[in-house]
Amino acid sequence: MAEHPVSLSSGAVIKSGVPGSDRNRVFRNPRPKVARRTLGQLSLIVLFLLLALVGPLVIPMSPTSQNLAGRLLPPFWLEGGSWGHPFGTDGLGRDLLARIAVGSRSSLIISVMAAAGSGLIGVTAGILAGFLGGLTDRIITMLVETLLAVPFITVGIVVTATIGQSATNLVLLLIFSGWITHARIVRLQVQSLARADFVLAASALGANRLHIATRHILPNLAPVIIVVLFQQAGSMLLWSASLTYLGIGMPVDQVTLGGIIREGQELIYTAWWVSVVGGLAIALAVAGFNLFADWLQRRIDPTLR
Amino acid sequence: MWSGMVGNVVEDEFLIHSVPCQNHQWCPSPRAQMLASISKRIVQMILTLVLASSVIFVLIHLSGDPTQGFMPAGASPEVRDATRARLGLDDPLAEQYIRFVVNGLTGNFGDSWRDRQPALDAVLDRLPATMLLAGTSLAVAVVGGTLIGVISASSRSNLLLNAVKVIPVVGQAVPTFWLGAMLMLLFAVRLGWLPSSGNATLSALVLPALTLASQPGSIIARLISTGMRDLGRSDFARTAESKGLAAATISVRHILPNAVLPVLAYVGLQAGFLIGGAVVVESVFAWPGIGRLALQSAVQRDLPVIHAFVVVTAIGVIVINLLVDILRLVIDPRQRTPGSGVVVANG
């Protein structure tokens, strides 16, 4: 049995002979590529999680203590910078790295809560609309289209002008505008699933609608929901930072990424790094969430591999 | 700002929207469709305005005394009571609610609480500046995005094609306001080519418009590029090729109109985010539009102006959607031919 396996194309092989070193060689080939891609896709989110969750605990500098003698220090890679303040200091001499770590933590908490809340409401509404159809569908669709005309920013402005700013209000307003994304996507998915053969078979066998919804439709929805959840966590982070930058998100006295950039923009002629570093932290987080969502999608959906 | 996602899920959704008269044997006549679209949008507008007014009303009364936000802290109880009476805040809640919603529908928001000017006028005064900014950005995004999409789809270069695919993914991670600040840092502070703020000259429009156009433009380029690649393999493209048409004619006359349909769906869906993005960009570049007015009014709790702002922007979003509906009828002849609406395969 000394035949060599015949390689048809990359990865495909006609099995023959004993499982020996030759076969392993064929299968070993695609692995490193996958691993490298996984590493690339996961490194950003891991980096951001380290910054947000571990950073505030291990960074010795205080994010709020002011030091007017040491204000506007540049980051370490510029002339005059030092490792004492790796990213430099802001207009009041506060350490930028510590502020970014603390701001990232609050951004992370807010965006995860907002994504989870809007996911819960949106998925429920989407399933109800797609599966029940009829009047329920029309009401939910109408509500979704109505809310599409009222963007996040508008809701943020209204909330600020009436009940004022707080972390709770921010999360609630993100959920208020965010659930429609889930509802729209889930509704379309449910509608196409409801026409699938296995659903037809189940109802022909006498399964009731609740059973079909929970045992046949929901499991098939799970991949889409999970992926959209993480994509939305990134979007929520972006939106909460935008609202905070505009002064209508988190209260002004909190340490936030949006607030760091707003303060940095006032210093753009003297200390440009403040807003640059703040923006990079947001980009790291959002790109991290999106790449993680891509990676999950690839893991969950075998057709994409 | 722009709804971030450009993943498969969402692109599928645009494509689903672009299939006309799904599963119907025939399409209604164009005039009937036009009327249906207009009446649907009018109903949507009324519903949106009622909902928006209701939410604002609930929030105002959740916050306790609405006069607290804008009265000086030391105001005497008599002055406070007089103000409450003047603004009608002592009437029964149901009466106040109905008055509030009806006022929202009829454009009678009352005077701004800050300066003695009707709130609607305050918003309408600032509207042209915002429309100039948003309109320019939308034009830049659609024209520029389409051009880049067509070029990348018809070129043999994989580099360009990949760039068009990757840039929206990177772009959606970059906050609009930060991009604006970085463009300002580069072109206004470092190079000094363009003004950093205001709207005194036309050159002041360049940076805000580019900032606002960047994200939708990159997504449109990607939609056009992938759409044209897919449609290039479709039956009608092959037919056109076998007729002996030039490649450029096939691309521009046959494939492009089909590839534009998802873009229209995208623009309609994102109209709200365009206006939201305009608010952000106005704030970054000190552009004197309705967004800056609304932000100032929010901090000052000037509720009539906020109410007028919400109503005006909601109408703007719905009007954009109406225009998209009509454009779709104009571009897509499949929707205009009564009785021939069997769904044409989309790729």
Image (spheres, rainbow, N blue to C red):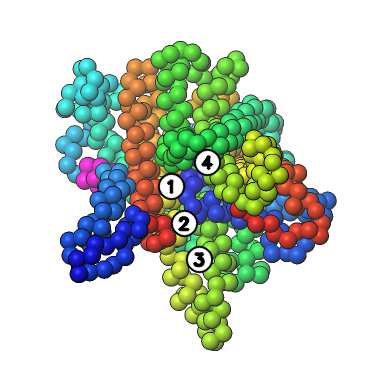
Q: Identify the element where label 2 is drawn.
A: helix
Could you tell me residue A99's position as x and y percent? 28, 35
* Nearer to us in this view, B46 or A204: A204
For disc 2, the marked residue is: A118
Q: Residue, x 44% and y 55% (percent of image)?
A: A228
Q: Quadrant of the image for the N terminus of chain A?
A: bottom left
For disc 3, the marked residue is: A124
For disc 4, the marked residue is: B222
Q: Which residues are magenta?
A: A48-55
Q: Are marks 4 and 1 in contact (CB under 8 Å)?
A: no
Q: Residues within 10 Å of mark 3 (few under 14, many from 20)?
A: some
Q: Residues within 10 Å of mark 1 (few under 14, many from 20)?
A: many
What separation in Å lies between label 4 and label 3 (alpha carbons)? 31 Å
* Nearer to us in this view, B143 or A245: B143
Q: Quadrant of residue B163?
A: top left
**Three-letter amino acid code of the residue under disc 1:** Met
Q: Please state the chain letter of the residue tagged with numbered disc 2 in the rendered image.
A: A
Label 4 or label 3, whichever lies nearer to me, is: 4
Label 4 or label 1, whichever lies nearer to me, is: 4
Q: Quadrant of residue A263?
A: top left
Q: Are marks 4 and 3 in contact (CB under 8 Å)?
A: no
Horizontal side of residue A287 vs B187, given as left or right:
left
What separation in Å lies between label 4 and label 1 (alpha carbons)? 23 Å
For disc 1, the marked residue is: A236
Q: Residue A246, labelled with which disc?
A: none
Could you tell me residue B42's position as x and y percent? 74, 50
